[in-house]
Image (tube, rainbow, N blue to C red):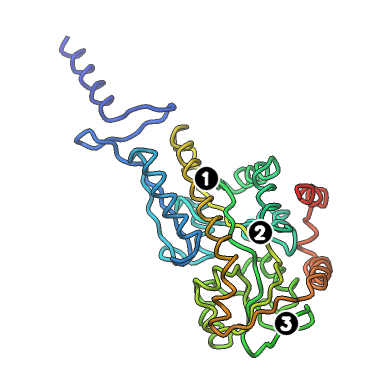
Amino acid sequence: MKTKVTVLVAVFFLLAVFTFAGGKSEAVSDDGAAIPVKLTFSSVSVPGDAHTRAMQVFKLELERISGGEMAVEVYHSGQLFYQEGEQAAVRKGTVDMIYTSPPWLAEFIPYLSMFGAVYTFSGYDHMKAVYGGDLGKKVFQDVVDSQGIRPLGAFYLGTRQLNLVEKVGPVRTPADMAGVKLRTPGSPSWIALGKALGGNPTPMSFSEVYMGLKTGAIEGQDNPLPTDKNAKFYEVTKYIVLTDHVVDTIWPTMNEKKWQSLTSQQQEWVMQAIDVAGKACDTQVLETEASILDFFRSEGMIIIDDPDKAAFQEYAKNSYINDSPEISASWDMDLYNEIQSYK
């Protein structure tokens, strides 16, 4: 009898330590309080960036709707990893969440280079229609199956424009970019993009770009205008060229093992918080883009608002085929045409 009582006490003790939801257990502390499920979210983005703010929105919203059952630790400005390192860290599970994007993933899923290529998307609405539809779901699932990481959405990073130092002079055609040391991240797809713009791709981590522009190690870079402002690139450059060459996205992404460790309710909370964060990010970027050129002009920058976009588009098409065949050979043109059908 004593043995049975001992067993029952042990069972009740275990029930006090673990509560069950969706078939998964949740730990509690010695005083019976639930220990929050912690997510660590890392980015190299700087504090003023919309997607940095979105990390905080995600944290606050998830902690609110979960009633404190989930907690998020946010690290920005490369506090944990440099840009290349965080991509590997999320695969290993060293960090739970990061931002990734098609050019980073294309090294492993080659056809994704199309989604970050020059002039694939015609504008914000086109991009949102693609990622919000069945095609977007298929792409995200391919990443899960291949890489063990799960994209949770596509936040609008902004439309990328050329940003150049004074030495380069005004640029209106790809020919004007000949020999220009154009910073790109270090992946093959990013380097192909630099070639497609007519420049001389010069790989460099984002955290080094400001000093690279200041010292002449690079002569230009391309980013959405809000990023140019928040990173203060206007202090060390002279020209912005409105090429509108990439409608850019950033994908909040979670390690798949971490995702699968969550209960179905927790996964639902995560997606609800991602939706709120994504809307905050997109709204901030769109509002900033609508008014930001006046700021750059007030800082003495010259805005080239009449580049020959048709020439850039034609040059980019030929460059991907001739200068970066290892990239364009992987493109699925039927899929590309499907992307265009969302316009």
Q: Earlier in the sequence, mark 3 or mark 1?
A: 3
Circle 2: residue type: Glu
Q: Residues within 10 Å of mark 3 (few under 14, many from 20)?
A: many
Circle 3: residue type: Val
Q: Residue at x 61, y 85 (%)?
A: 165
Q: Is residue 170 left or right of residue 270?
A: right
Mark 3 vs 1: CB contact within 8 A? no
Q: Which mark is residue 88?
A: none
Marks 3/1: CA distance?
38 Å
For this rendering, which residue is in front, 51 or 83? Answer: 51
Q: Which mark is residue 107?
A: 2
Residue 139: x and y in percent read 67, 46
- SS of the residue at dot 1? helix
- Residue labelled with disc 3: 171
Q: Is residue 185 above or below residue 145?
A: below
Marks 1/2: CA distance?
27 Å
Q: Is residue 216 above or below residue 58?
A: below
Circle 1: residue type: Asp
Q: Residue furthest left?
A: 2
Q: Residue at x 54, y 69 (%)?
A: 227
Q: Quadrant of the N terminus?
A: top left
For this rendering, which residue is in front, 156 or 315? Answer: 156
- SS of the residue at dot 3? loop
Q: Earlier in the sequence, mark 3 or mark 2?
A: 2
Q: Residue at x 76, y 50 (%)?
A: 343
The quarter holding residue 318 reads bottom right
Residue 51: x and y in percent read 50, 59
Q: Is residue 277 left or right of residue 11?
A: right
Residue 41: x and y in percent read 44, 54
- Residue labelled with disc 1: 275
Q: Is residue 160 left or right of residue 23?
A: right
Residue 119: x and y in percent read 75, 62
